Amino acid sequence: MLRITKSALVGATLALLAASAHAERNDPGSLMIFPEYDSRQGSYTFLTVTNVNSSESVRVHFNFVDGEDCGTNNAFETLTPRDTITFYSTALSPTPGRGFCYAYARGITNAAAIDFDYLIASQITLDGMSGSEYQLNALMFEGKTGEGNPTDLDNDGRRDMDGLEYGATPDRIAIPRFFGQIEGEGQARAELILIGLTGTKFDTTVDFLIYNDNEEVFSSQHTFDCWDRVPLLSISGAFSNDFLANFTNNDPGEIQGFPVFESGWFVMNGAVASSTATSVGQPAMLAVMVEVSRLSSASLPYTIGEQTNGQLLSQSVSGN
């Protein structure tokens, strides 16, 4: 963990302000990413996809990416106009495991991935390991080739989030608030779901800027493969309630009305993704924070800027 100087803090803050920071509307799309499925014993994930089109059917291709070995299982479902499907994850991916799922629209009469921005999606995860549960909308990406047109412009068999096939991925991801973390069984904690978008053969390193409640900033890094779910305290001690309260120049009046806990916010940026053959700078990635407690919750993050090098999902050590 590194404490950043005042001049570095000013530079980082100006860089954030200079970016086009906004929260995307979660509009219907052609490509969706469910940040987590969990079909281990005692845990359950229910995935839902709905076709809001009133006259056209669509075939949806589901791909389940295992977080342990990055292997994939896939399945297909057809949705008629205004149809919806909800299923327990093992119904389509029978191998027990945990990871993420992505799905996309395909044509009814051919196998081509198509621009069909009429899909909406959500998930419910019941985590028997932690006793928590949360509901979350899928991360949606619009098609960019025109309604009904094929999206695989480069014929590589992958879904490119490059602004040409599908919408671009975020340049940086911001989480507006975390509570100071306390170690120990039964304590409320937050965990971060991370998804790498370079390829299954790559490890992605993410840079973190962690701000306390008084504009002090600290830095950290975390490296993962295609998918990870990791406690904030495993990423950096700067998330610790004790550290924030006793070893930073924190604001003693916050959290307002409940100053027992400290709080802060953080920004993530892909630093490098590496395989045995190559490295990719500024790799695309996605992240969602899940708060695990008696009243658990999760919400879509805020995004800052765009980048065009995300894809689902290369199996090559060369990436895209």
Image (cartoon, rainbow, N blue to C red):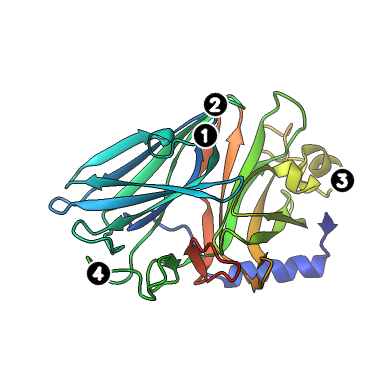
Q: Are marks 2 and 1 in contact (CB under 8 Å)?
A: yes
- Considering only vertical position in the picture, is 112 above or below 91? below
Kind of residue indicated by mark 3: Phe
Q: Residue at x 43, y 58 (%)?
A: 24
On the image, the x and y values in percent for residue 5 come to: 83, 65
The three-letter amino acid code for the residue at tag 4 is Asn
Nearer to us of marks 4 and 1 is 1
In the picture shown, does residue 185 fall above or below 12?
Answer: above
Residue drawn at the location 70% of the way across and 56% of the way down: 223
Q: Where is residue 235 in the image (x, y as percent from the top left)?
A: 74, 48
Residue 257 seen by the camera: no
Which residue matches tag 2?
A: 41
Q: Name the residue under label 1.
A: 96
As drawn, the label of residue 247 is 3
- Sequence order check: which comes first, mark 2 or mark 4? 2
Q: Which of 236 and 109 is in front in this view?
A: 109
Rounded to the nearest whole Å, what is the CA distance between mark 2 and mark 1? 7 Å
- Dot 3 or dot 2: first in sequence order is 2
Dot label at residue 149: 4
Q: What element carries label 1?
A: loop
Q: Examine the rendered structure and indicate whether residue 241 appears above or below residue 301.
A: above
Q: Quick check: marks 3 and 4 in contact, CB under 8 Å? A: no
